[in-house]
Amino acid sequence: MSVGFEIPGYSDNLVAFSSKTSLMDADLLLISPEAICPSAHGWFSFTAGGGCYDISTSESFLQNINHLRKEIGDFLKAGKSIFIILTKKEEYSLARSVSHPRKGENLYSTSTSTNYDFLPVNLGDLNSASGKYINFLGDPKFSEFYKIFKNIL
């Protein structure tokens, strides 16, 4: 099965982020965090700049994140493999509540969520990088791999 990434010839195994489908029938899972985002509607802008998703869209997004996190946790506990296509980390401003202090004025309480919040583990800092050369500074166990493949670029 895949979430957010269609494998050519296996369109039937594509699962929408918002589908609440059980993933336990699969033996292997491929996820693209690029597809982990609130629905396209429900965004509104603040008069002072910025904005957030409305409460309904925000709650739906958080429910989908929690469902996917639980499914992935269960998937990993069952000893199954997950491949994640690392994409840019995106942050989303979500409305948690709204109050009306004055007539015609809405005051929103917001929180921030990302397209990586579905993971049941913390990956640490993700840094996007590009370049032509790799300098190996890592674990010596991988130095032979580096020696073999460093000139392939």
Image (tube, rainbow, N blue to C red):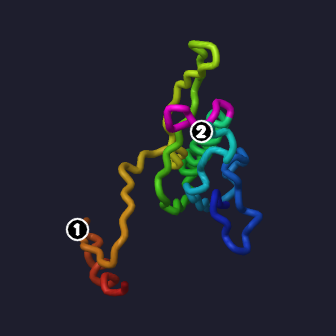
* Residue 119 picture location, percent across and down: 51, 47
- Mark number displayed over residue 120: none
The amino acid on which the numbered mark 1 sits, given as a three-letter code, is: Leu
Q: Is residue 51 magenta?
A: yes
Task: Name the residue at 37% across, 49% down.
Answer: 124
* Mark 2 surroundings within 10 Å by alpha-carbon count, few (fewer than 14), some (14 through 19), many (20 or more): some
Which of the image's four quarters has the C terminus? Answer: bottom left
Which label's residue is closer to the chain start, 1 or 2?
2
The amino acid on which the numbered mark 2 sits, given as a three-letter code, is: Asn
* Residue 75 picture location, percent across and down: 59, 50
Determine whether 139 is above or below 63 in the image. below
Check disc 2 and report its element: helix, strand or loop: helix
Which residue does the numbered mark 2 point to in the structure image?
66
Determine whether 101 is above or below 147 in the image. above
Relative side of 76 to 131, left or right: right
Q: Quadrant of residue 26?
A: bottom right
Task: Name the residue at 25% across, 66% down.
Answer: 138
Relative side of 119 to 41, left or right: left
Which of the image's four quarters has the N terminus? Answer: bottom right
- Mark number displayed over residue 137: 1
Q: Is residue 100 magenta?
A: no
Task: Name the residue at 71% across, 44% down.
Answer: 20
Farthest residue toward the right?
12
Task: Name the residue at 66% across, 70% down.
Answer: 7
Q: Which residues are magenta?
A: 45-56
Check disc 1 and report its element: helix, strand or loop: loop
Viewer-proximal residue among 103 and 68:
103
Q: Quadrant of residue 57?
A: top right
